[in-house]
Image (spheres, rainbow, N blue to C red):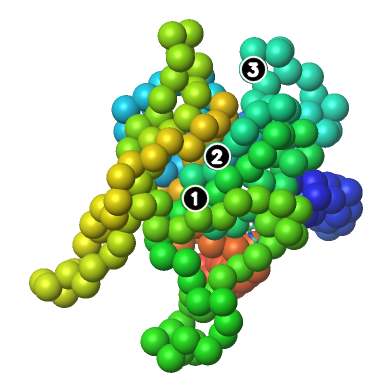
Amino acid sequence: PNFKLNKAVIDRRIALLEEEGIVFKYNSPVDVEHLPEGFDAYVVSTGTPTARDLKIPGRELKGVHFALEMLSQQNRVLAGMEFKKEELVNAKGKDVLVIGGGDTGSDCIGTAHRQGCKSVTQIEIMPRPVDGPDDPKNPWPNWPRTLKTTSSHEEGCTRRWNINSLEFLGDKNGKLTGVRVQEITWKPNPDGGRPLMEPVGKPEIIKCEMVLLAMGFLKPEQPKFAPNVFVAGDAANGASLVVRAMASGKQIAAQIDKFLSK
Ligand SMILES: Cc1cc2nc3c(=O)[nH]c(=O)nc-3n(C[C@H](O)[C@H](O)[C@H](O)COP(=O)(O)OP(=O)(O)OC[C@H]3O[C@@H](n4cnc5c(N)ncnc54)[C@H](O)[C@@H]3O)c2cc1C
């Protein structure tokens, strides 16, 4: 979102790269299984295009969206692009439920606020992380499972953990009116596998007119490429961070240099 990264920063960086001699071609989808001819080496850096879906009853209702339907459209709206009213994914005047407690969900909260939503609730299926760095079960250098509170959370949001979504509910016009959810608990798996989810108490309904699904992205499976095709960034490693994508790009650049120098 622009409130996190002003697009002028991106434009400035692209201008620098163009000055270095890189040619960017926009609106050019490439079928990576049939790469265009005429290059000595290729880098596939197509990111993680497939968001994790929530296939529970009512998924087809009007008002249930993937997070990026909203987030990428909002960037385009702010860049001056126009959309038909029926295409707009806009939270104005709505109670919004964000499903997924991570960074993408946090971006949805900040964007919903800027669009003028009535309220935002964020639910997460996993337990609330510890509110500090000192969990002995989670020592360095493991990924810190600590509670993250972003500026978007601070702008106002109800946050709940250990909540499973059971069903999207709608009216007779096919419009979303709420989500049936249930509090759960996680029990250790006697077989040593993933912890087991157990319901706690009765299901309840969270009233909302908009749901944003922010439950992560599937790691892409790449075909077996020829030796002159390299894969970088999220396309290689799964959804991660900008710094990791940049580090991956630098590593791949070094590998291509070696490959071409042979
Ligand atoms: C909502 C959201 C918020 C995030 N916030 C942060 C954050 O705050 N900090 C952080 O560090 N990271 C954040 N990330 C993660 C970060 O954006 C990614 O890790 C990073 O952008 C990965 O870079 P990449 O170049 O590998 O892929 P991407 O940035 O995903 O770029 C892939 C590009 O390839 C294009 N493409 C895909 N398929 C094709 C094709 N067939 N032909 C041509 N082009 C194609 C796509 O249109 C896209 O432009 C966030 C991600 C999301 C989704």
Check disc 2 and report its element: helix, strand or loop: strand
Q: Amino acid at mark 3?
A: Glu
Who comes first in sequence, dot 1 or dot 3? 3
Q: Which of these two is toward me, 91 or 19?
A: 91
Outermost residue to the front: 201
Who comes first in sequence, dot 1 or dot 2? 2
Q: Which of these two is toward me, 88 or 114?
A: 114
Please name the residue that numbered disc 1 is placed on.
123
| Quadrant assignment, res 77 | top right
Check disc 3 and report its element: helix, strand or loop: helix
Q: Which of these two is toward me, 204 or 157?
A: 204
Residue 195 vertical position relative to residue 116 in the rendered view, above or below: below
Residue 234 vertical position relative to residue 33 in the rendered view, above or below: below
- Answer whether labels 1 and 2 touch (C-beta < 8 Å): yes
Q: Residue at point 55% right, 39% down?
A: 97
Of the numbered discs in the image, which one, if any, rests on residue 97?
A: 2
Q: Residues within 10 Å of mark 2 (few under 14, many from 20)?
A: many
Which mark's residue is nearer the viewer, 1 or 3? 1
Q: Residues within 10 Å of mark 3 (few under 14, many from 20)?
A: few
